[in-house]
Image (cartoon, rainbow, N blue to C red):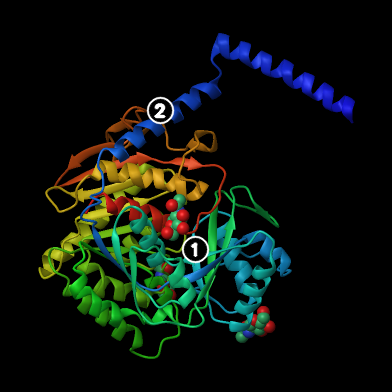
């Protein structure tokens, strides 16, 4: 044993000595790569620091709705523990009724590594999953839900936040002092079960192509937006600079009574339409598959939003609804820049086309899409949104910080997966923009808007993917209000 160790050491010494020699003569490709990552990082940090947040007059942000307690587990470990066999039939289900559907639905999103969130319509099954997760070594509990995560990020970036949600008393204790809760007190908070998986994880014959998570929930409170009334009352005096709406996916495929969902959403419309012109409105998209709900969103929510945030799955889904087609459940989890930008242009055009036709609503002036490899934003020129370049840089840095679980970015745990240059559109003859290490955020103007794209230093030692979109979106917004 000792001998082995010694010879191992010796071998190691010889190796590293050769490595030094090699680096000296050749500069190994790895060190060139490292230098490139370091240069991109320091340029992004410089761009982020270029604008500060006004800490004296803290920006005021109101965020709804809901929240939950997340239990975060390793997805495959959990499924193995409950003895769920890998299915040979990956299949999409709008909601989950039994263990077989869970296996099929998980397999469907796990292999491509696409983010997904489904309602479990079977209390027995959901309780079993929660119980098993409680006992799983390495599980973690945290404050979850789009609204509380965005509220947390905004508060720690220097905002005063009004949060619409109904929480248990101990939940309120862990929230930042800069967050005021508007809502009811509940004894039993809703629980969301986060099945995380790293890139290259295997479950039976399936291997995940990238790190992501599959979320299941079986909420009692969140679908009813039951903090809405209290939130509405407080809103008038709070006078926010920004009003953010998220968490509406908890209504997806929920067994509402006839007319209940529409009533809730028209109440939301009243709140949004009475927001003062000085208050900007942002809507954060999510994993929706319920077509009835989605067309309600197009009618009740989108017309009142100045700004939209979403990921690479949610963008094609929303676009396909605008085009009058069905929902798109699964899209490429690693899309090219050109593809995403074309989709963003089309969405921006279609939303604003509707705006012109009806003339009573807010135009869409900001669209932020977060993907694994890059951040992209469209902002209307001359609109209220400032500092787009820095905001995109901050969004990009936040992606790494969140996924790696550390505020300090370590480039040895990061890589660039965006190409050395990207095409601004899939149209033939489109301009290509090189990714410059010293100026990694590329911004240019088209028509009446500016586009900015920033590469993400993709984290390779994943701590957590869930909540990433919320942290990223919130980080982008704080520099723009
Ligand atoms: C609900 O889940 C339990 C536990 O997995 C299962 O025994 C039962 O058959 C399921 N119910 C339905 C209606 O599928
Ligand atoms: C769209 O959805 C409907 C209802 O779910 C289905 O009948 C139809 O075949 C779908 N169309 C396409 C093009 O997928
Ligand atoms: C994301 O937001 C949550 C909630 O505010 C926070 O606990 C977590 O640390 C954030 N992640 C990062 C990297 O800031």
* Cα distance between the residues tagged 2 and 1: 34 Å
Residue 332 appears in the picture as rendered: no
**Corner quadrant of residue 47:** top left
| Mark linked to residue 116 | 1
Q: Position of residue 406 (x, y in %)?
A: 49, 46
Q: Residues within 10 Å of mark 1 (few under 14, many from 20)?
A: many
Residue 263 appears in the picture as rendered: yes
**Which residue is situated farthest in the top direction here?**
25
Q: Residue at x 27, y 54 (%)?
A: 367
Decide if ligand 3 comes within 8 Å of the CB at mark 2.
no
Q: Residue at x 17, y 64 (%)?
A: 279
Q: Nearer the viewer, residue 326 or 180?
A: 180
- Whether residue 14 sits left or right of residue 332 in the image: it is right
Q: Residues within 10 Å of mark 2 (few under 14, many from 20)?
A: some
The answer to whether marks 2 and 1 mark residues whose Cβ atoms lie closer than 8 Å is no
- Whether residue 298 sits left or right of residue 124 in the image: it is left
Q: Residue at x 26, y 57 (%)?
A: 347
Q: Position of residue 24 (x, y in %)?
A: 57, 10
Quarter holding the N terminus is top right
| Mark linked to residue 39 | 2
Quarter holding the C terminus is bottom left
Q: Nearer the viewer, residue 158 or 104?
A: 158
Give the structural element (helix, strand or loop) at label 1.
Answer: strand
**Which residue is situated farthest in the bottom direction here?**
258
Give the structural element (helix, strand or loop) at label 2.
Answer: helix
Q: Position of residue 275 (x, y in %)?
A: 17, 71
- Whether residue 340 sits left or right of residue 479 in the image: it is right
**In the rendered structure, which disc, 2 or 1, sits on the residue that comes first in sequence?**
2
Give the vertical position of 122 relative to 83 (above or below).
Answer: below
């Amino acid at each position: 044993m000792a001998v082995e160790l010694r010879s191992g050491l010796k071998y190691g010494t010889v190796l590293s000595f050769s490595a030094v020699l090699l680096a000296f003569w050749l500069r190994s490709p790895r060190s060139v790569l490292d230098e490139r990552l370091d240069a991109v990082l320091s340029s992004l940090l410089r761009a982020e620091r270029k604008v500060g947040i006004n800490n004296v007059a803290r920006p005021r942000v109101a965020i709804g709705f809901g929240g939950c307690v997340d239990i975060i587990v390793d997805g495959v470990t959990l499924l193995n523990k409950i003895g769920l066999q890998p299915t040979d039939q990956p299949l999409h289900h709008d909601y989950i009724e039994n263990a077989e559907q869970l296996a099929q639905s998980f397999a469907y999103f796990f292999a491509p590594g696409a983010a997904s969130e489904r309602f479990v319509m079977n209390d027995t099954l959901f309780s079993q999953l929660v119980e098993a997760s409680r006992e799983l070594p390495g599980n973690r509990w945290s404050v979850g839900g789009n609204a509380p995560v965005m509220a947390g990020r905004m508060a720690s970036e220097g905002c005063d936040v009004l949060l619409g949600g109904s929480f248990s008393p101990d939940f309120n204790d862990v929230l930042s002092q800069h967050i005021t809760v508007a809502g009811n007190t509940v004894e039993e908070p809703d629980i969301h079960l986060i099945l995380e998986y790293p890139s290259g994880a295997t479950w039976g014959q399936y291997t995940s192509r990238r790190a992501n998570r599959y979320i299941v929930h079986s909420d009692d409170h969140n679908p009813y937006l039951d903090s809405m009334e209290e939130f509405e009352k407080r809103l008038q005096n709070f006078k926010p600079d920004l009003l953010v709406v998220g968490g509406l996916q908890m209504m997806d495929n929920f067994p509402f009574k006839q007319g209940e969902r529409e009533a809730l959403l028209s109440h939301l419309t009243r709140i949004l339409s009475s927001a003062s012109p000085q208050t900007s409105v942002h809507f954060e998209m999510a994993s929706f598959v319920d077509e009835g709900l989605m067309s309600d969103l197009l009618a009740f929510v989108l017309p009142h939003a100045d700004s939209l945030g979403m990921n690479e799955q949610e963008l094609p889904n929303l676009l396909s609804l605008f085009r009058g087609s069905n929902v798109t459940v699964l899209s490429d989890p690693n899309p090219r820049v050109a593809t995403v930008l074309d989709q963003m242009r089309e969405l921006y055009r279609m939303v604003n086309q509707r705006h012109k036709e009806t003339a009573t609503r807010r135009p869409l002036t900001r669209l932020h899409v977060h993907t694994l490899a890059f951040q992209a934003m469209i902002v209307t020129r001359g609109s209220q949104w400032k500092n787009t370049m820095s905001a995109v840089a901050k969004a990009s840095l936040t992606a790494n910080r969140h996924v790696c679980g550390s505020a300090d970015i370590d480039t040895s745990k990061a890589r660039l997966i965006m190409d050395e240059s990207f095409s601004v559109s899939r149209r033939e003859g489109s301009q290509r923009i090189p990714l410059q290490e010293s100026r990694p955020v590329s911004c240019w103007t088209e028509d009446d808007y500016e586009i900015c794209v920033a590469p993400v230093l993709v984290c390779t030692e994943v701590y957590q993917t869930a909540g990433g979109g919320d942290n990223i979106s919130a980080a982008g917004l704080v520099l723009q209000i």
